[in-house]
Each structure stands twice: as structure tokens, then as C-alpha cells.
Amino acid sequence: MASRKLAGFDEDDYWDEEDDWDEEDEYYEDGEEEACGGEEPPSSKVVAAPAKPKAQPQPKPKPKPPPPMNSPSISKKMEALRVGGFVIEPSLKKLCDQAAEDERSAGKKTVLSLVVLGHVDAGKSTTLGRLLYETGVVTEREVTKAQKQAKEIGKASFAWAWMLDERPEERSRGVTVDVALARFETASKRVTLLDAPGHRDFVPNMISGAAQADAALVVVDGSEGGFESGMRGQTLEHVQLAINLGIEQIAVVVTKLDTLGDAGRSESRFAHIRQEMEQFMVRCGFRDVSKLRWTIAVGLTGDNLVAPPTLESLGWFRGQTLLDTIDSFMPPTRDVEAPLRLSVSESSAKGSKNVIVSGKVHQGAVQVGTKVALVPPVPGEVGVVKSLSIDAGRGTPNDIKLTFARAGDTVEATVTVSDPSVVHAGSVMTSQAAPVQVAECFLAQILVLDITIPLLHGQNLTLHAHSVRSTGVLTRIVSIVNEHTGEVTKERPRCLLKGQSAIVEITPSPSMPLETFDGCKALARVAVRDGGKTVAVGKVLKIFNKAT
Ligand SMILES: Nc1nc2c(ncn2[C@@H]2O[C@H](COP(=O)(O)OP(=O)(O)OP(=O)(O)O)[C@@H](O)[C@H]2O)c(=O)[nH]1
Ligand SMILES: [Mg+2]
């Protein structure tokens, strides 16, 4: 029995340009703003516009600011595009309605996708590995075997983490590399657990996990100096990404308080971390910190996982156990009447005619026998869904066959296609009648994170959205805007600095399956990275492709 790993990315190979910002450069040329959004469709090879010979000075036409995101004209167009006359199959609608009705009846559990985030070595896998044991998913035998083997290679303290870290390289290094997937249940939820890596080299894998989650546990190391090093590292980056990838439900789990000895020290440490984290979350855009959940956990002893702590030094804690904290998250809302969007996090060919894809259904629904498109390529590999299941793994010893799946579910689908090799992680399984768009260029509102070198027009970037990754070029900086109101404060700035919110145009290569924020939020959030760091996060406002 093995926990499944999401298909991950290799260690980054980022283009890293030293400061090439020339104060004297003429930045924009006349007409340049037509690059993607104008009459001409963009070339898929668009890069920074070449320098043109200077024309006679002429008054520059005033650039047309993009309509605000909530402009009625954009909303209407997007709504028309999103729905596109799409109507859910009546038989499928009936199945979804019945399932929703069943879920409302007493005693039925709802689904929840939960990602576990935090700095390297914070104790994520140890805490969750132990929780799998406490909830009966992992057996005593498995634990004893792992403890024996971990001791043999001098990694005894990682035995609980091995319940999720199953790859040989993860075990020998004591570091999670790829997102591990397991399932367990709380009183009211069937939880799909995504244990993300904390090491900075594997942030792209973490993004793919977080993009599928309805809620997040942010695990913070409470030991002396542990919290502080996380705040200089991936606690910071993970929280910024989680919030901007749209995760609204977050619980902070403080681990390793057992290392502080007496109750006074651990209690004041918890209070200190809580205060610091609350201030930090507000700075990251988490509006209402009263909605944050707080708990403590000691994975090694099992304290406060499913029952209140028994360690004397933690006797002061009066909050919820970890299991009850998870149980208190709200289930995802299920928009089943929208066109199907399943982002593929893993894909493998089965014979010459079938492909097995797994991932989260972000919106819509699908049943066995449905014709679907797998995008890209454009216009999409069309296939028929042969089977649907919740695949075997930790918490699901055998495949669970399904007749249909709906928004909120994480499933595996076998699809009969003509060429399984063109489908991969990052593809989207979509309704044939209203397929996802493939962006050759897009307009986004981004928030620039903690950068030291300004973001420049023409800069090469790495782009992440749902499970897809691409490279791209910042082809236009349209304007700087007020983050909250969308009001333009500066048009066509020369560069973007830390903390600024801006409307930009990005040209990915290869093109990416994306949606606008008005269409399907889960496929409209982008993370922009450069030099192994996340430099900006944002949402897609408009997509340009050859068909536009
Ligand atoms: N004392 C103490 N040690 C802990 C606790 N939780 C985890 N550890 C130890 O911390 C180390 C790292 O634990 P992991 O669970 O691998 O940490 P992680 O956050 O999953 O690390 P990555 O996935 O690589 O980012 C191991 O040696 C654990 O035994 C805790 O509550 N108390
Ligand atoms: Mg881990």
C-alpha cells in the first residue's frame, strides 16, 4: 500500500539575469501596446519588442487603460464565453443533485482537499504520518517496519515521516521532494491529504499541490530559532502562494513545542508565534485573521493530534486537536453546472488507446461515457471517459469505482483517446462543448512580492498555474494599479517594484491552458517565478489566442 505522489517538476533551471535595467532606455515605443491585445494575433514566439528607429517626435496617443476587472462589459463577455450555451447533461445533473441531497442528510461525510505547507523540516510529514496512524489508515506493522529501517540508516527520527515520504531519495535525505497523496476521515469529512515539500528547490511541486486544495495547514516549527528561520524561508513563500492561489481556509499548526521543556516557555512561545504570524498574514493579504485556526501538534508523541495533549509542558493548551481543526474546515462549493474543468496532476498511457489522468475537478461534472477534450493540444485530444475511480493509496486500499465525479472531487479517469502521449500533467480535461482556452498571451493583474531587482519589460519568467508550468516573457507593463480598487495610479511604468500591483501582459511559451478569473478561478491564478524565487502572483483577466 503506497501513498501516491503527484507528478512533480525537476529541480528548477531558471534563467537568471543580472540587473540590466538601463535608466536611459526608451521603454515603450508607439503602438507597442498592440502586442497581443490588438488586431494582430500574437506570435507564439513574442519576446521583448526589438528597438525601432526613432520616428519624428509626435504626440503619443494616450494609452487606453484596460477596463477594470469588474467592468460590466468584460464580465458580460466572459460570462457568455464561460457558459457558451453550455448546459449540463440532464442525467448527470440528476446524479449531482441526488449526491448533494445525500450529502445534506445526517451522517454523510463531505470531501475536503487539504494541503500541508511550511518550511523544510517543520514537521509536516511527521505530524501527518502520525495522524494517519492515529486515524487507523497506517497499521502498527507498517510503523514498526519503518522505525526499524529508519534506525538502520541513521534516520530514526524520520520514521513517522516515512508514512508519506516513500521514495528512496526522500528517505535517505530526510526531505520530502514531491507531494504525497493520502486519504483519511474526520467526523464529517473524507479528506484528500496533499503533503507538500518544504525545501525551496521543490516549490514548483508545492504550487501544484496547493492549487488543488480547499484548505491548508501551515506547519510552523515552534522550537528555538525554528520559527524565525522559516520566516526567512519557505513559511513566508508558501503562505504568500497559498493565499494568492485562492486558499481561504488556513490553520496554523505549531510543532516541536515539546523541545522547550517547561509549560511557561512553550505557552509564551505559542503566543509570540501567533502574534507574529497574524501580522504577517495581514501583510500577505489575508484580510480577516480572526478566521485563522490555531492548534499545536507533536508528531513524535502524538500529542494533540486526536486527543488533548498529555505532555505536562503542553497542559496549558485549550484549543482544538489537529483532527477537530481539520474537521472544522468548510467543504468546497460545488459548481456542477459549469463546463467541466479537471486539471491533470498526473498522467500515464495505458496501452495505445487509453490514458489515465488524475486530478481535481474544479468545476462541472463528468460521468462514464462522457465525451471530453484533453487540452492542450489545440483544439484538444477528444476522448471518451471509460472509467472513473478514487485510486488505491494510503486510506484507500482498493480502487473505488465511480459512475460520475463532480466539482470538489479528486479522481482518476481512464479516457480512450487516439494519442495518449500528448496528454500530460498540466493538461485540462474539459467539456468538449466549452473547452478551456489555451493562452498564447494573457493580461493579468499581479502583485509583486519581495524582490530586490525590479521586474522589467522583456524579462524572462517561469510561470505556474494549476498543474501547468511554462516559461514566458513579460511583454507589456500596462499600468500600476491600486491593489484593492483596481484604479490606475501610473500608466506604462518603466518597471515594477516590490509591493506594487500591476496590469501586465505575459506571453507564455509554450502556450498554457488557462481561464479568466471571471470564468474558473482555480485555472486563473498564476505564480510568476524567477531565479528560484516567486516574484509575483496574480489572476488572469483576459486571454489572447489565435481564435480571439
Ligand atoms: N521534537 C520534535 N521533533 C519533531 C516534531 N515534528 C517533527 N520533528 C522532527 O523534525 C524533523 C523533520 O520532520 P519532517 O516531518 O520530515 O519535516 P517536513 O516538514 O515534512 O520536512 P520537508 O517535507 O522536507 O519540508 C524530523 O527529524 C522529525 O522527527 C515535533 O513535534 N517535535
Ligand atoms: Mg515532509
Image: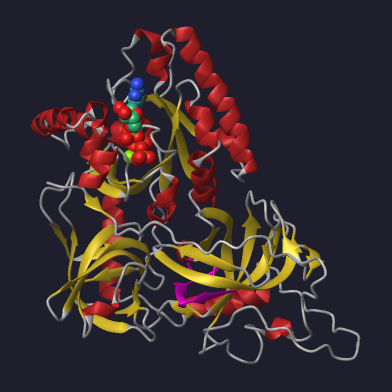
The picture quadrant for ligand 1 comes to top left
Residue shown at the point (49%, 11%) measured from the top left: 265
Q: Nearer the viewer, residue 307 or 500?
A: 500
- Is the residue 379 above or below the residue 179 in the image? below
Residue 393 screen position, x and y as percent = 17, 49
Residue shown at the point (71%, 56%) measured from the top left: 497
Residue 38 image-quadrant placement: bottom right
Q: Is residue 371 visible?
A: no
Coloration mode: secondary structure
Residue 377 screen position, x and y as percent = 36, 82
Q: Nearer the viewer, residue 359 or 387?
A: 359
Residue shown at the point (22%, 35%) measured from the top left: 132
Range of residues picked out in magenta: 506-521
Q: Is residue 38 left or right of residue 422?
A: right
- Is the residue 40 above or below the residue 191 in the image? below
Q: Is residue 5 magenta?
A: no
Q: Is residue 89 visible?
A: yes
Residue shown at the point (13%, 32%) measured from the top left: 149
